[in-house]
Image: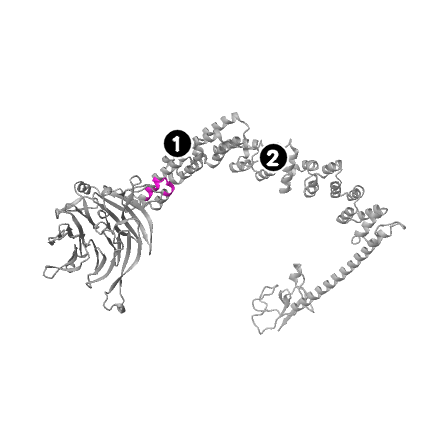
């Protein structure tokens, strides 16, 4: 029914079949009207058929032997009006015996019953031939008629909505208000050259106040409005305003509203290129968007109706069902139903145009509303389409979303990819858990990579959990490949990972060590492989001595210090690295190796030898001295000599070997030995540069006069003046420091004396709770009238005067016997209480 187009159609079409097909084989359709519940079809042979929405005949009426011109139904669908070419008019109840019959002497072209005819107050209908008649039933059940209009030719179209009746005659369109009994407008015909019987007017009420008029190629949208009271005078209470008017390309055969748009059935004539004669083309059904003076075409479909080559404009009719947006295109030999396309139809069109991704998205968004499609089926079709186009990576990526957790479908797709040699494309997207596929699937992909891409194979082994496939099968496959390329680092590393998955840590560790791979230490820690590395310590140290030593020291309980030292016996440089770090961590743990370390430091790490000698309390000094003297390590020898008490030899070595007076002076200061200073002065007395150094540095340790008196007359001493000035400055500084200290001492003493005096001047509370420290009875007598004498010391100890040890003294004792006995300092008596 539709033209091929890249733009999706808005409507879908199907023929009304069943009983309609049977009717139109012997008869021809002349008119039709639509109710929400059923259809009424009139024919050229005077028959009226009631049909269900599938086209099945439910009732048949033989109304006339000639053409039925129009059928009208009220809104309830209970009453029907029929008029025919022989002048017959019938209005009757479909479910009641109510009936009206009348035969006129001229053809009756139109009939319209009141929309609410079922009500007793609305028993009205209009007919039209040469004049428009209104029939009304009176209170005595008699029908009376009145002429609403005449004199302008045959009445050819009528539509009744609410209280308004619109009709068309040869001159134009009129609207009548049945309530006020007034005609409220006349819309003249635009193209008077067209025969009104061949190109009839199409009328359609969009709502109760909006009338759409189509005539020839012109469309007018009219709005019925209430007139303001001030404008009334003798005019009708309502008036009509044309809100939109435009021309169409073809002749209009019918109109129907669709939301704010219009559905237009057009009669098309085209000119043959061969004969240059006009012929009847397929009618068109267009959806247009009305604007004020023009319109915008939304969609346009050419309809292949039966016998369209013989039809005229008047042979087509467009009827519609407001509730369901169904449009019926009626022609003499065919009835076609157009309906809005639903989401299933939209997906059908997308699939037809191979827009699979859009179809899948549409199905996902509207999955609750679609009835004929399944998201999975669309997705599988999309994957097949991508594979056919050769877009294997995209197809594989879509599998994740489309196949989801369906293991069977996953396995099916994998085999499809295998058939086209694209297993590598799908491998990154295979599920690795929930669902888990058969091990054979994963092994098949791993074998594919192993044959052509070692790096890709290694990546999959790293990323895939080891329980997805049969590990032993893959291990054997890798080993077979290593027979051909035994030094391939990628395969070796991958084999180590496979051994790790298989908990064959020993083999994995051996490969990692051979490859000098950084993960070796992580592997050892993670799987506690310390028992496996006891004979591989040298390999670990060669690979990364820092990490190896840290690991060994952190796990002394698993690999003992003794074992490590033994393993490194043939590699003293590595042994030194291990023992040095052990010493840094704990000076005492490796004390049994300190003697060995002396030689190791001397051989491989002299800068750390002296710090080691200083910090170690376990190395044999004689051995150390012997080694240092053999290697002529002066600084270390000096330290060892001084530590062994041979300070004079150490000083001599500094002076004679190092010739460093500053170091000699520093050494003498550290030792703080007068004899050393004497040796230093004697050694330096004939060396002017040494004398300068001594003069500059010994002022605070040795009286400079001792040195100055020994300087020979006439000896030139560099910077002598500066040195003497410095000595005087140092002396003055010492004097100033002593005076400053004295002042501070005096001030502090005075402050403390004042504080003590204030404290001793304070009173001491004596009450019934205090006891005598000697007799341990209450210090105050129970009888306050008796005389008593109490002695209280500043230390807060209290005594009865008669209880003080020793004979009574006069004056009384000055010190507390308790505090003096405990050596806490004497407490002076500050108060004697008598009564």
Task: Estimate the x, y position of residue 503 in percent, counting from the top left.
Answer: 48, 33
Task: Estimate the x, y position of residue 548 in percent, counting from the top left.
Answer: 59, 37
Task: Estimate the x, y position of residue 528 in percent, counting from the top left.
Answer: 52, 36
Q: Which quarter shows the N terminus?
A: top left
Tell me if residue 586 can be seen.
no
Numbered circle sitting on residue 541: 2
Please state which of residues 671 and 735 is positioned toward the viewer in this rendering: 735
Please state which of residues 254 and 201 is positioned toward the viewer in this rendering: 201
Q: Is residue 350 magenta?
A: yes
Please state which of residues 487 and 508 is positioned toward the viewer in this rendering: 487
Category of crowding for the residue at label 2, using alpha-carbon neighbours closer than 10 angstroms: few (below 14), some (14–19), many (at least 20): some
Numbered circle sitting on residue 415: 1
**Magenta segment range?**
346-358
Category of crowding for the residue at label 1, using alpha-carbon neighbours closer than 10 angstroms: few (below 14), some (14–19), many (at least 20): some
Please state which of residues 790 and 614 is positioned toward the viewer in this rendering: 614
Task: Estimate the x, y position of residue 657 in percent, counting from the top left.
Answer: 79, 41
Q: Which residue is farthest right?
A: 714
Q: Check the image and report above or below for 478 versus 658.
A: above
CA–CA distance between discs 1 and 2?
Answer: 49 Å
Tell me if residue 338 can be seen.
yes
Asked which secondary structure carries label 2, the reply is: helix
Q: Could you tell whether 722 is left or right of 173 in the image?
A: right
Q: Is residue 200 magenta?
A: no
Q: How is the image coloured?
A: one colour
Which residue occupies 37% across, 41% down? 355
Q: How many marks?
A: 2
Which residue occupies 82% across, 50% down? 692
Q: Nearer the viewer, mark 1 or mark 2?
A: 1
Q: Could you tell whether 81 is left or right of 418 in the image?
A: left
Q: Which quarter shows the C terminus?
A: bottom right
């Amino acid at each position: 029914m539709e033209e091929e187009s890249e733009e999706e159609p808005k409507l879908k079409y199907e023929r009304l079949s069943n009983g309609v097909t049977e009717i139109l084989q012997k008869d021809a359709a002349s008119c039709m009207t639509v109710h929400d519940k059923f259809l009424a079809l009139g024919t050229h042979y005077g028959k009226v058929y009631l049909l269900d929405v599938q086209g099945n005949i439910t009732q048949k009426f033989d109304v006339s032997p000639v053409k039925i011109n129009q059928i009208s139904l009220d809104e309830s669908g209970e009453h029907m009006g029929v008029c025919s070419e022989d002048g017959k008019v019938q209005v009757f109840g479909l479910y009641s015996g109510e009936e009206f019959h009348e035969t006129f002497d001229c053809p009756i072209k139109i009939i319209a019953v009141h929309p609410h005819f079922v009500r007793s107050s609305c028993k009205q209908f209009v007919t039209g031939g040469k004049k428009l008649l209104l029939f009304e039933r009176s209170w005595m059940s008699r029908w009376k008629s009145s002429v609403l209009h005449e004199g302008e030719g045959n009445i050819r179209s009528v539509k009744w909505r609410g209280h308004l009746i619109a009709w068309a005659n040869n001159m134009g369109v009129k609207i009548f208000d049945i309530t006020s009994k007034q005609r409220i407008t006349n819309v003249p015909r635009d193209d008077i050259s067209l025969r009104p019987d061949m190109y009839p007017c199409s009328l359609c009420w969009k709502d109760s106040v909006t009338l759409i008029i189509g005539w020839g190629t012109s469309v007018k949208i009219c709005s019925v409005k209430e007139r303001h009271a001030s404008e009334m005078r003798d005019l009708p209470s309502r008036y009509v305003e044309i809100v939109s008017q435009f021309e169409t390309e073809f002749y209009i055969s019918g109109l129907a509203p669709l939301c704010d748009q219009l559905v237009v059935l057009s009669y098309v004539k085209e000119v043959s290129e061969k004969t240059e004669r006009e012929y009847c083309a397929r009618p068109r059904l267009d959806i247009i968007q009305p604007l004020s003076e023009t319109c915008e075409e939304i969609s346009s479909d050419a309809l292949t109706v039966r016998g369209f080559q013989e039809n005229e404009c008047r042979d087509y009719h467009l009827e519609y069902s407001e509730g369901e947006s169904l449009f019926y295109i009626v022609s003499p030999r065919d009835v076609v139903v157009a309906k809005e396309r639903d989401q299933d139809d939209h997906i059908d069109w997308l699939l037809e145009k191979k827009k699979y991704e859009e179809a899948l998205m549409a199905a996902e968004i509207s999955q609750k509303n679609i009835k004929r499609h399944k998201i999975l089926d669309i997705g599988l079709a999309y994957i097949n389409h991508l594979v056919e186009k050769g877009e294997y990576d995209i197809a594989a990526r879509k599998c994740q979303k489309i196949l989801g957790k369906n293991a069977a479908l996953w396995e099916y797709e994998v085999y499809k990819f295998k058939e086209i040699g694209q297993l590598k494309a799908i491998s990154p997207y295979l599920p690795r858990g929930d669902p888990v596929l058969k091990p054979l699937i994963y092994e098949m992909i791993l074998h594919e990579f192993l044959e052509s891409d070692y790096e890709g194979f290694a990546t999959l082994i790293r990323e895939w959990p080891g329980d997805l496939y049969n590990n032993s099968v893959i291990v054997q496959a890798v080993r077979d490949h290593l027979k051909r390329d035994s030094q391939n680092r990628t395969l070796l590393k991958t084999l180590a990972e496979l051994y790790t998955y298989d908990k064959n840590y020993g083999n994995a560790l051996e490969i990692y060590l051979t490859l000098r791979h950084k993960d070796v230490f992580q592997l050892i820690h993670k799987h506690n492989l310390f028992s496996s590395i006891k004979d591989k310590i040298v390999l670990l140290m060669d690979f990364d001595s820092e990490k190896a030593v840290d690991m060994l020291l952190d796990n002394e309980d698993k690999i003992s210090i003794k074992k490590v030292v033994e393993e490194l016996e043939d590699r003293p440089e590595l042994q030194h690295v291990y023992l040095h770090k052990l010493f840094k961590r704990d000076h005492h743990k490796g004390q049994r190796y300190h003697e060995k370390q002396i030689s190791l430091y001397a051989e491989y790490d002299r800068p750390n030898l002296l710090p080691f000698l200083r910090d170690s309390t376990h190395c044999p000094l004689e051995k150390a001295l012997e080694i240092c003297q053999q290697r002529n390590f002066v600084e270390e020898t000096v330290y060892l000599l001084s530590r062994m008490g041979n300070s004079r030899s150490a000083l001599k070595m500094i002076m004679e070997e190092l010739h460093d007076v500053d170091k000699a002076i520093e050494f003498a200061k550290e030792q703080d030995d007068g004899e050393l200073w004497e040796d230093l002065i004697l050694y330096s007395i004939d060396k002017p540069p040494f004398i300068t150094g001594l003069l500059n540095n010994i002022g605070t340790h040795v009286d400079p006069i001792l040195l100055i008196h020994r300087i020979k007359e006439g000896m030139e001493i560099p910077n002598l003046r500066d040195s003497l000035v410095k000595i005087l400055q140092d002396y003055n500084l010492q004097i100033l420091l002593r005076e400053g200290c004295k002042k501070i001492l005096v001030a502090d003493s005075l402050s403390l004396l004042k504080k003590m005096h204030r404290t001793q001047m304070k009173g001491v509370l004596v009450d019934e709770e205090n006891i005598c420290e000697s007799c341990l009875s209450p210090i105050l007598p129970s009888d306050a009238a008796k005389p008593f004498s109490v002695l209280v010391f500043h230390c807060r100890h209290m005594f009865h005067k008669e209880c003080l040890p020793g004979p009574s003294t006069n004056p009384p004792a000055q010190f507390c016997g308790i505090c003096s006995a405990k050596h806490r300092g004497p407490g002076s008596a500050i108060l004697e209480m008598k009564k």
